Amino acid sequence: MEVIIEHACGMDVHKDSITACIMTPKGKEIRMFSTKTVFLLQLIDWIKEH
């Protein structure tokens, strides 16, 4: 099967938390973040790293 997307991120968004999963050719990583601004900025940085 041909790989179409090498990097993907899925998020489960709730009132007080966000669970994000990043899938790359190296594997997958799951992290949880609070919905406060400082943690949302950390989420953005984490996604940009991948």
Image (cartoon, rainbow, N blue to C red):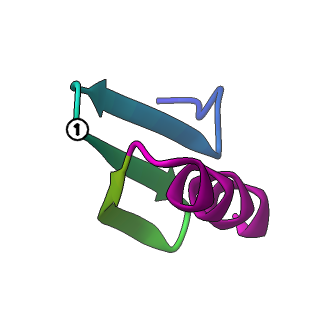
Region in magenta: 35-50
Question: From what the image shows, is residue 29 above or below residue 43?
Answer: below
Other residues around mark 1 within 10 Å, as few (<14) / some (14–19) / many (≥20):
few
**Magenta: main secondary structure:** helix
Residue found at x 55% / y 63%:
25
User: Quick check: 24 left or right of 13?
Assistant: right
Residue 24 picture quarter: bottom right
Q: Nearer the viewer, residue 18 or 3?
A: 18
Name the residue carrying label 1: 16
Q: Quadrant of the C terminus?
A: bottom right
Q: Secondary structure at mark 1?
A: loop
Question: From what the image shows, is residue 48 above or below residue 20?
Answer: below
Q: Nearer the viewer, residue 38 or 18?
A: 38
Residue type at tag 1: Asp
Give how far across and how far down residue 35 sits, in percent. Answer: 40, 42
Residue found at x 29% / y 26%:
13
Q: Nearer the viewer, residue 45 or 17?
A: 17
Give how far across and how far down residue 31 sits, in percent. Answer: 32, 64
The count of marks equals 1
Give how far across and how far down residue 5 sits, in percent. Answer: 64, 32
The answer to whether residue 14 is magenta is no
User: Quick check: 19 left or right of 44?
Assistant: left
Residue found at x 34% / y 53%:
34
